[in-house]
């Protein structure tokens, strides 16, 4: 299976998981958590998909503003890994909000 297909399948599963979480919040009546949940999902799902592009864009801007000879913006594996860890953390925090029972 090629990388594009794997990425598309992951994105579909993330979206399905986000919809199931929102449905769980609505069924349990936790309307207070709905807005933070939607915000966390709206941030984490696209950033997980576009992690490499966002890291490259950030490196290019940093290079343009802070170096005499700007580089091509190729991100390091450390930066990519740290981005993924942060994005997955935001996604998991959102899922935890969806699992909190109604008071």
Image (spheres, helix red, strand yellow):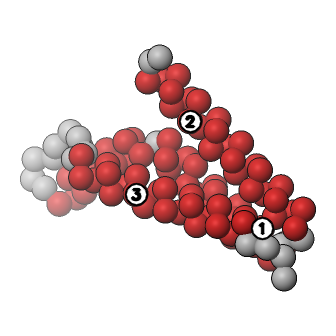
Front label number (3 vs 1): 3
Q: Tell me the crowding category of disc 2: few under 14, some 14 to 19, or many 20 or more residues within 10 angstroms, Cα based.
A: some
Count of marks, rendered view: 3
Q: Is residue 23 above or below residue 36?
A: above
Q: Which residue is mark 3?
A: 85
If the image is split into quadrants, where does the C terminus sit? bottom right
Q: CA distance from mark 2 to mark 1?
A: 23 Å
- N-terminal of the pair, mark 3 or mark 2, is 2
N-terminal-most mark, 3 or 1: 1
Q: Quadrant of residue 62?
A: bottom left
Secondary structure of the residue carrying tag 1 is helix
Q: Is residue 79 left or right of residue 25?
A: left
- In the rendered structure, are the residues bearing label 2 and label 1 in contact, judged by CB atoms less than 8 Å apart? no
Residue 7 % position (x, y): 51, 31
> Residue sitting at 72 percent across and 64 percent down?
98
Element type where label 3 sits in the image:
helix
Which one is in front, 86 or 69? 86
36 shown above or below 50? below
Q: Is residue 24 left or right of residue 92?
A: right
The residue closer to the viewer here, 49 or 91, is 91
Answer whether labels 3 and 2 touch (C-beta < 8 Å): no
Q: Is residue 71 left or right of residue 11?
A: left
Q: Which mark is residue 10?
A: 2
As helix, strand or loop, the secondary structure at mark 2 comes to helix
State the residue position of label 1: 34
Q: CA distance from mark 3 to mark 1?
A: 24 Å
Left or right of 84? Residue 34 is right
């Amino acid at each position: 299976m090629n990388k594009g297909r794997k990425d598309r399948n992951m994105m579909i599963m993330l979206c399905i998981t986000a919809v199931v979480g929102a449905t769980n919040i609505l069924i349990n009546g936790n309307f207070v958590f709905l807005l933070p949940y939607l915000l966390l999902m709206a941030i984490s799902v696209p950033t997980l998909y576009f992690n490499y592009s966002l890291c490259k864009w950030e490196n290019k801007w940093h290079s343009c503003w802070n170096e005499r000879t700007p580089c091509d913006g190729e991100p390091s594996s450390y930066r990519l890994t740290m981005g993924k860890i942060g994005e997955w953390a935001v996604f998991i925090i959102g899922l935890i909000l969806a699992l909190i029972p109604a008071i």
